[in-house]
Image (cartoon, grey):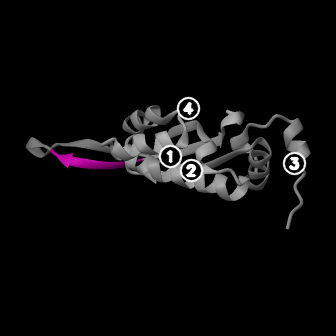
Amino acid sequence: MQNIDTKKHMKAKTPAHMLPRKVRAEADQAAGIARASTKMQRVPPRKARLAADLIRGLKVEEASLQLMYSELKGGRLLKKTLDAAVANAEHRLQISRERLRVKEVLVNAGPILKRAKSKNKGGSVPVMKRTSHFTVVVAAEENV
């Protein structure tokens, strides 16, 4: 197993998404945050961001209720990611669900599935089936 010097990465001010997974997990734990990500979800990012805007900055309990009762497909998928982030926080940081708050919600574009739809006179038009990547970061209320 490779020994990674975490201090070297911290001094260089490398963006978090570019750090090795193990180093990022240690940095997150030191900062008191937990994250979860879900990739390749078959919902357009533009529609999923509507659900993400509902929960940004809310307590986890309120955010979960918002997503449960929103009739958006993105909300249903984002709730699974939120629940995973909460489970990570409870397991790794030993913080109860009631003390957690949604710190950050990212919805990024994933790969596009390109299909064709037939039209009249032998023509066709492209159909873009867009996918999304979700990232949810939760933290204790005093860290937000």
The residue drawn where x is 45% and y is 47% is: 78
The residue drawn where x is 34% and y is 46% is: 73
- Calculate the distance from the C-alpha at mark 2 to the C-alpha at mark 1: 7 Å
- Tag 3: Cα neighbours inside 10 Å, few (<14), some, or many (≥20)? some
Mark 1 in CB contact with mark 3 (< 8 angstroms): no
Label 4: which secondary element: loop
Magenta span: 112-118
- Calculate the distance from the C-alpha at mark 4 to the C-alpha at mark 1: 19 Å
Mark 2 in CB contact with mark 1 (< 8 angstroms): yes
Tell me which label, 3 or 4, sits earlier in the chain.
Answer: 3
Check disc 3 and report the residue beneath it.
6
Label 3: which secondary element: helix
- Tag 4: Cα neighbours inside 10 Å, few (<14), some, or many (≥20)? some
Check disc 4 and report the residue beneath it.
57
- Calculate the distance from the C-alpha at mark 3 to the C-alpha at mark 2: 22 Å
Label 1: which secondary element: strand
Tell me which label, 4 or 2, sits earlier in the chain.
Answer: 2
Check disc 1 and report the residue beneath it.
133
Tell me which label, 3 or 2, sits earlier in the chain.
Answer: 3
Amino acid type of the residue tagged 3 in the rendering: Thr
- Calculate the distance from the C-alpha at mark 1 to the C-alpha at mark 3: 27 Å
Q: Position of residue 120 (x, y in %)?
A: 9, 42
Mark 3 in CB contact with mark 2 (< 8 angstroms): no
- Tag 2: Cα neighbours inside 10 Å, few (<14), some, or many (≥20)? some
The residue drawn where x is 34% and y is 41% is: 70
Amino acid type of the residue tagged 1 in the rendering: His
Pair 3/4: label in front: 4
Q: Is residue 1 visible?
A: yes
Q: Is residue 114 left or right of residue 79?
A: left
- Calculate the distance from the C-alpha at mark 3 to the C-alpha at mark 4: 29 Å
